[in-house]
Each structure stands twice: as structure tokens, then as C-alpha cells.
Amino acid sequence: MATQATILLVEDNPDDERLAIRALRRANISAEILIARNGEEALATVFNTNCLPIVMILDLKLPKIDGLDVLRAIRADAKTRLLPVVILTSSSEQRDIIDSYDLGANSYVRKPIEFDRFTEAVGQLAIYWTGINEPITLER
């Protein structure tokens, strides 16, 4: 399965969604931004496409299916197991951090409370995953 120049943002908080989109645009990210507002939508988006996003930015505390279960499902499927997943959450609980890495998260970032720090963190994530990291591009 190929990757495409899209970012899948999985976020149920409308304010954080708006801030993240704003940060991505401020960072001059040209990738299309797909939004999933719960875990069920995230899995449907990933499993019902021919091209994977270049990265999934995943909140943990989600309705319907929580972020850890989304990550578990992605890593369990051969066609999505290599999809880069960045956890972006307000949780600083050690159990969430450990579980995320145990399940194969590529990165764990705690959402900064301050607007400027939040936009900087999201912008830096996007720059790395869309401009510096070498994505998988082979058909699977």
C-alpha cells in the first residue's frame, strides 16, 4: 500500500483540531489534512483507502474507540502496521506513554497548554514527518 501526501489528524476536541490545522498551515505544510473525530472514523479512514496517510497524529482520549485501541488495530494489520503514528495527547500518565510505545507508536507528544507552544509542537511534527522523514512509497 502506498503513502500519499496526507496527514490524518485524529482529534475529538474542536478547539485542538482548529489549533492543529492552523499550526500545520503556519508551517507551510502542503499535505492534505484528513480529520477523524473519533477512533471509529480513524480506522475507517485508514482501512478504506488505497493510499495510507504519510502520518497519523492520534489523540488517546477518543469517543467510540480510544486511541490505544486504534493503534492496536493499525499495528495488527499487515497493510497498516508500518504507518507512522504520533500520539498527541494531554495525558502525561506513564501508563499511557508505556502502552503507546508498547503498541508501536513512533512518537509520544504531550499537548502543550499554551497556544504558541501547541502550534510550534504541531508544526515541528508536521515538518519532520512530511519533509524530513523518508516515507514508505512502495505498493504493498
Image (spheres, rainbow, N blue to C red):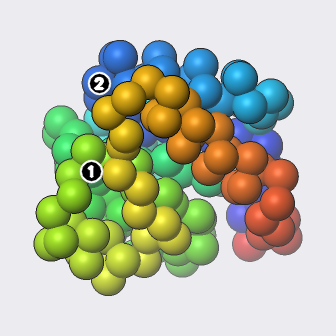
* Labelled disc at residue 26: none
- The amino acid beneath tag 2 is Asn
Q: Position of residue 42 (x, y in %)?
A: 41, 42
* Labelled disc at residue 13: 2
Residue located 20% across and 66% down the image: 96
Counting residues from the start of the chain, the first of labels 1 and 2 encountered is 2
Q: Position of residue 56 (x, y in %)?
A: 53, 50
Q: Is 8 above or below relative to 36?
A: below
**Left or right position of 27 against 81:** right
Residue located 42% across and 56% down the image: 109
Does residue 85 appear in the picture of this structure? Answer: yes
Q: Is 121 above or below relative to 74?
A: above
Residue placed under numbered mark 1 in the picture: 60
Q: Position of residue 51 (x, y in %)?
A: 71, 50
Q: Is 22 above or below relative to 80?
A: above
Quadrant of the rendered structure where residue 39 is?
top left
Q: Quick one: label 2, few (<14), some, or many (20+) residues within 10 Å?
A: few
Residue located 74% across and 31% down the image: 27
Residue located 49% across and 58% down the image: 86
Q: Nearer the viewer, residue 49 or 6?
A: 6
* Circle 1: element type: loop
